[in-house]
Image (cartoon, rainbow, N blue to C red):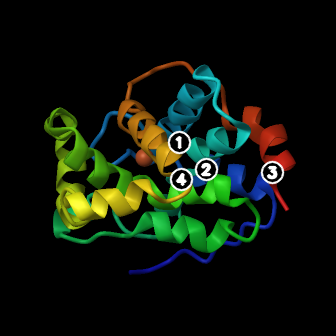
Amino acid sequence: MEIAAIQLKTPEDVLELMNSRGGESYFGEDVTVLEHCLQAAHFAVETKSSPELVAAALLHDVGHLLHNEAEDIAGEGIDTRHEELAVHLLAEHLPAAVMDPIHMHVAAKRYLCFAEPAYCASLSSSSELSLQLQGGPMSEEEAGSFMALPFAQDAVKLRRWDDEAKIPELKVPQAETYLPLLKTLWR
Ligand SMILES: [Fe+2]
């Protein structure tokens, strides 16, 4: 898989990446990657989440902007492991309370599919396809280990916003709105 040569040294770099590369459609959904991320962040704000979790929601799919693969890549049976890509570039700048939920948001889908069969049945077709590539629902043992991890609850919250953040033409604040928040967390 080809990884874009991108460096993220400042919060401004991250927002620039989102604004410049986030215009592609979000994996078969009716929103762009940028719209999807902004909606997820907005849902986190609406539920009065911590700044760290708002940042996690905003940045959870930055990994999708870091590879040069087409948006239908899951249809070719390839998992880009976008959650790992995001951690690779951002972990040195942001605390675990931001990075762990991002890292775990794919596993959280596998967890919810184990814990809530109705959740699994409600997944969009592209989400269901990627679930299979990501290993399918967790076993009971995997689910127990997952929920014992720090930030597992936050990862599950992020996952639910991730699933909801696919609403065409929903008006939400722009990426720049989150610059002060990112600056307080950045190191
Ligand atoms: Fe997402």
Eyeballing the image, is 175 above or below 73?
above
Residue receiving disc 3: 185
Mark 4 or mark 2, which is nearer to you?
Answer: 4
Amino acid type assigned to the residue bearing label 4 in the image: Pro
Task: Report helix, strand or loop for mark 3.
Answer: helix
The 10 Å Cα crowd at callout 4, few under 14, some 14 to 19, many 20 or more, is many
Residue receiving disc 1: 34
Left or right position of 63 against 7: left
CB contact under 8 Å: marks 1 and 3: no
The disc, 2 or 1, on the residue closer to the chain's N-terminal end is 2
Q: Quadrant of the N terminus?
A: bottom left
The 10 Å Cα crowd at callout 1, few under 14, some 14 to 19, many 20 or more, is many
Which dot marks residue 137? none
Which residue appears at 19% of the width and 61% of the height? 139
Which dot marks residue 101? 4
Task: Report helix, strand or loop for mark 1.
Answer: helix
Which residue appears at 30% of the width and 51% of the height? 111
Cα gap from disc 3 to disc 4, whole angstroms: 15 Å
Q: Nearer the viewer, residue 49 or 148?
A: 148
Cα gap from disc 3 to disc 2, whole angstroms: 18 Å
Cα gap from disc 1 to disc 3, whole angstroms: 21 Å
CB contact under 8 Å: marks 2 and 1: yes
